[in-house]
Image: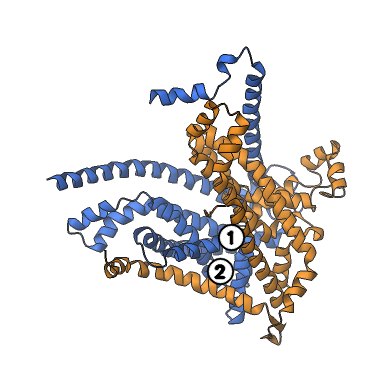
Chain colours: A orange, B blue
Amino acid sequence: MGRVTKLFRAAPAYPLLLPGMLWLAVFFFVPMYYLLDMSTRTGNLIQGFAQTYHFANYTDAITSNQAQLTRSLLYAGSATLLAFLIAYPLAYVIAFRGGRFKNLLLMLVIAPFFTNYLIRTLAWETILADHGIVTHTLKSLHVLSVTDALGFTSGQRLLATPLAVVAGITYNYLPFMTLPLYVSLEKIDKRLLEAALDLYANRARAFLRITMPLSLPGIFAGTLLTFIPAIGDYINAYLLGSTQTTMIGNVIQNKFLTFNDYPSAAALSFTLMAGILVFIIIYARILGTEELA
Amino acid sequence: MTTEAEFPATALQPAADTTAARPPSRFWAKVRYHVLTVYAALAFLYLLIPIAVVIAFSFNSPPGRFNFTWHKFSTDAWQHPFSTPGIQDAVILSLKVAVLSTVISTVLGTLIALALTRYRFWGRSLTNFVIFLPMATPEIVMGSSLLTLFITISFNRGFTTILIAHVMFNISYVVVTVKARMAGFDRRLEEAAMDLYANAFTTFRKITLPLIMPGVMAAALLAFALSIDDFVITQFNAGPDITFPLFIYGAARTGVPVQVNVIGSMIFLTAVLLMVINLIVQNRRSKRDAAISRGAVRAAQAAEAA
């Protein structure tokens, strides 16, 4: 087929693409430019913000919110790790033992999405409440004394502690971790495992040499789909945490919507975006996979 | 086939014929098996308990403003789900935005999905990347950048800006969903229709659309769910308007009315119902479609042979 014919056959694709891509261009990419532009401006709401290429906005915003930035990394990292530890065996059981109930079990996994994000986070507020069963049980088992000592909780309570925030984030993004893991585990040819066992590999070795490597795309996608929204999250910290557990999302939200400190908020927002992009690139190199989402 | 069916049974129990020699391994295999199942069951509990709490507390009659401790059973809130001031407007706004953004994003996203699956064109991988990017961006970045745009060009925030935002974040999900369902699409059916003198539009309406419909419906459901649930991007771009999630956020510090749990439960039950219907319809459709395309392909082959 000649170049011209090829182009002619492909031509109908462009009108199909145009409206949707235009929408994304104007309302996703152009705003990114405006965010970048705002991040180096100075001024205030009344006199307006003028472009002064004040790059110190970045260093100021980062140094004065170092605690929140580290906390976001720590909380999102812990939540991602916890979600992985819960989701991997769960996805494994559904994929390998689900049988004809696979679809039903998957529906149960995404069931939390059927109710509102804020409502299910508020449900955790009920579950972890100071006079609730969970707090009471953990207190009488002296678990809270241990977690208090470790700094995960404080004052013999669960609410308004780092533990509550991390538990909430883990819960809210668990389906994002489970689904990609399931997809990659489900794809694995079971005969490979049988072959390994026939060749006298023990179960652990078969898992480490076959199941685990073949589920790497799922691990990659699942951890990213959990970590990325988790690091920008501010609802869990707002509803389940205290002023001692604020994350970078809370700072951005407050600066934008309460203090109208747009340049500083934009600088933080852009830092977050850039940090995530760098992280994805490094992470993709380490896990050696190009398969995204 | 029989060998394949018997194969796993023997392969998975390598210790079976050496039981006498190695009894512990069989014991530990059993323990391991059940530990994993129990672990998965606990994970399901973790996923489902909060939902049970939401539904249970919709029948609570709290003594104060906070619905956090169980007081006594009541169906009051279910009988008057919209009695709390502001909640009805919030739900109506959420529904309006969800319906409109679903329609717009489903059309725009389906067109992109059609282009991506049916044509090899210059810029195809770039398009895929552009579609992927919004899904890899934290909501707070998308919300705040869109807000910055509206602030900079002094565009008043409200219904329009919420709608713009929702369509924006929905498009990618629609594209991905429709694309996934179009993977097994048989182009020969369209060619057959064209051979039978159907024009491009008729072919699309009679062949393409019915075949991709399950994918489009699934995408629309997903878009609707994402829209009605969205909080972060909406909060940044709502201005003075209040959607249902924004209403809950506002009420969180001053006391969430039981009605919120009632509406939350309603949304949950509706979603479950839709999901079940979707599963059943798709099962039937895929069986029927398989039969139709088998028939059509056979007819085409027969025609070719003749």
Amino acid type of the residue that numbered disc 2 sits on in the rendered structure: Ile
| Quarter residue B16 falls in | top right
Gap between marks 2 and 1 measured at Cα: 10 Å
All told, the count of numbered labels is 2
Q: Secondary structure at mark 2?
A: helix
Q: Tell me residue A187's x, y (percent).
A: 49, 41
Visible residue check, residue B59? no
Please tell me the numbered disc located at residue A150: none
Q: Tell me residue B165's x, y (percent).
A: 54, 68
Q: How many other residues sit within 10 Å of disc 2, few (<14), some (14-19) or many (≥20)?
A: many
At 43% from the left edge and 52% from the top edge, which residue is drawn?
B180
Q: Tell me residue A160's x, y (percent).
A: 79, 53
Amino acid type of the residue that numbered disc 1 sits on in the rendered structure: Asp
At 63% from the left edge and 13% from the top edge, which residue is drawn?
B21
Using the image, determine if residue B259 lies above or below residue A206: below
Using the image, determine if residue A16 lies above or below residue B290: below
Using the image, determine if residue A117 lies above or below residue B39: below
Residue located beneath label 2 in the image: B162
At 67% from the left edge and 50% from the top edge, which residue is drawn?
A80
Visible residue check, residue B101? yes
B104 relative to A4 in the view: left or right: right
